[in-house]
Amino acid sequence: MIRFVARKVFLGIRINPQLKKVLEEIAGAEERSVSQISELLLRRGVEAYKMEGSKYLQRFLSRHKKEELSE
């Protein structure tokens, strides 16, 4: 059975220019669009969050805070 999925909704976000460059590089290397790579990475993050809860985010937030303090 073939299932057709309706077009996805738009999500506009602001990101660091360096992050955008890295996403573009990954997309080029994988022969995918930036949108496809971004959605894949977001999905993986959401799945990890579902498994670990707020502990998943806290690891990144505490690391980010440490990096800000060391600058």
Image (spheres, rainbow, N blue to C red):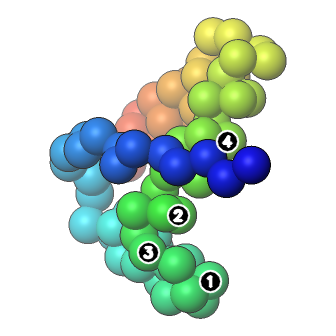
Circles 3, 2 touching at the beta carbon (< 8 Å): yes
| Marked residue nearer the N-terminal end (1 or 4) | 1
* In-front residue for pair 71/32: 32
Which residue is painted at 47% across and 56% down in the image?
38
The kind of secondary structure element at disc 4 is helix
How far apart are the two marked residues, 3 and 4, measured between alpha carbons? 17 Å
Amino acid type of disc 2? Ile
Q: Residues within 10 Å of mark 2 (few under 14, many from 20)?
A: some
Q: Residue at x 41, y 70 (%)?
A: 34
Question: In the image, is residue 70 above or below residue 30?
Answer: above
Mark 1 to mark 4 CA distance (whole Å): 17 Å
Disc 2, disc 4: CB below 8 Å? no
Which residue in the protein does label 2 denote?
A: 37
Tag 1 residue: 30
Residue topped by disc 4: 44
Q: Is residue 59 visible?
A: no
Q: Do the numbered discs 2 and 1 sit on residues whose CB atoms are within 8 Å?
A: yes
Q: Amino acid at mark 4?
A: Arg
Residue 71 vertical placement versus 33 (above, below): above
Mark 3: which amino acid? Ser
Which badge, 2 or 4, comes first in the chain's sequence? Answer: 2
The amino acid beneath tag 1 is Glu
* Residue 23, position as x, y percentages in the image: 45, 70
Q: Position of residue 48 (x, y in %)?
A: 73, 29
Q: Is residue 56 left or right of residue 8?
A: right
x and y percent of residue 45 in the render? 63, 36
Asked which secondary structure carries label 1, the reply is: helix
Q: Nearer the viewer, residue 28 or 69?
A: 28
User: In the rendering, which numbered label is found on residue 33?
Assistant: 3
Other residues around mark 4 within 10 Å, as few (<14) / some (14–19) / many (≥20)? few
